[in-house]
Amino acid sequence: MDRLEAMAILLRVVDKGGFSAASRDLGMPLATVSRKVNELEGHLGTRLLARTTRKVALTDAGAIYVASARRILDEIDETERTAAGELRVPRGELILTAPVFFGHLHILPIVTAFLGAYPKINVRLLLSDRNLHLIEDHVDMAVRIGRLPDSSMIATRVGSMRTVVCASPRLLAAQGTPKTPHDLAKLPCVNFEILSPASAWSFRMERGKSVNDVPIRSRLSVTTAEAAVSAASDGVGATRLLHYQCADALRKRSLRIILADFEVDPLPVRLLHTGGGALPSKMRVFLDFAAGRLRETLSSL
């Protein structure tokens, strides 16, 4: 059995979502594709794929094996390019993910500049407010805002992000500016459900003390930051957002930050990738390119 060939076929099955699609993409008989994967599983003594009538899914062992196989094949490809005289010219497809609004505002400009600097690299930028799984969703690198669960992922911190409460000057003039979080009971609120799933907002009541959840009077609940900003700017109520989500409205003075003394600790912002082995050159150069630019952008917010 040619293990490298079997690895490549397995990755194609995973990337294409099934044996038939991989067979068509490879120009290889379906029976051969299936046999090669079966032989690899037999060699390893474990099941890598859970097969159903419609699709295949990675087992836990399969997810670990596929991540390692990708690194191995990437390193072999880079080694061969070096031997062929291409030296260290990074190339290939780089798959990135970021939150929708943050990605549009701050990651897309970095990606467009990166494409100009590295013409041999193509980028797929997956903007999603759902945290994609780097291995299962075949993502090379992710932007994460918030605390990370313990994992084998490698994280490069590029800054931090405040969580702020803001309201329109018109609303505050009409109903008064709250002095403490408990004053929010008298103020209508627009709740951004992604950040605060329950109708309660977190505040640090005293510096260095524990965080408390304070009930709010939610007049409107929305599922996008843009809707929260728009409604709050129109005077519907105060809202609670990540600072970058309302930065433009703050600059235009359609919103004003309130209760700043009670904010919870800023959330870390990181670039995240899987651990183990040397980084493929396409990922290494993007990390070097993006980290400094993100730090500069976030320090100005």
Image (cartoon, rainbow, N blue to C red):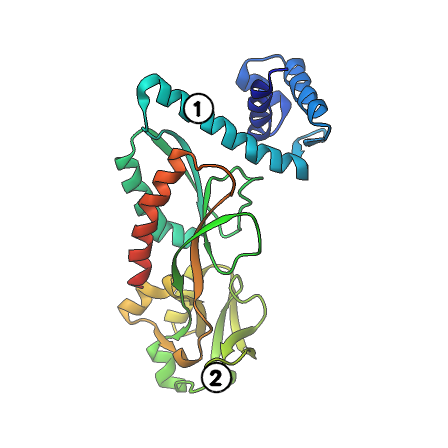
Determine whether 76 is above or below 290 in the image.
above
In percent of width and height, residue 60 lies at 67, 39
Q: Which numbered disc, 1 or 2, marks the residue closer to the eye? A: 1
User: Which residue is under mark 1?
Assistant: 77
Instruction: Out of 143 and 68, give the one closest to the viewer.
Output: 68
- Image quarter (top left, top right, bottom left or bottom right) of the N terminus: top right
Viewer-proximal residue among 200 and 235:
200
Tell me the number on the disc at residue 206: 2
Which residue is pictured at 50% across the width and 26% down the height?
Answer: 73
Residue at mark 1 to residue at mark 2: CA–CA distance: 55 Å
Q: How many marks?
A: 2
| Residue found at x 59% / y 18% | 23
Q: Amino acid at mark 2?
A: Glu
Q: Residue at x 37, y 82 (%)?
A: 172
**Residue 72 in the image, given as x and y percentages of width and height:** 51, 29
- Taking depth in this image into account, of 288 and 98 the one nearest to the observer is 288
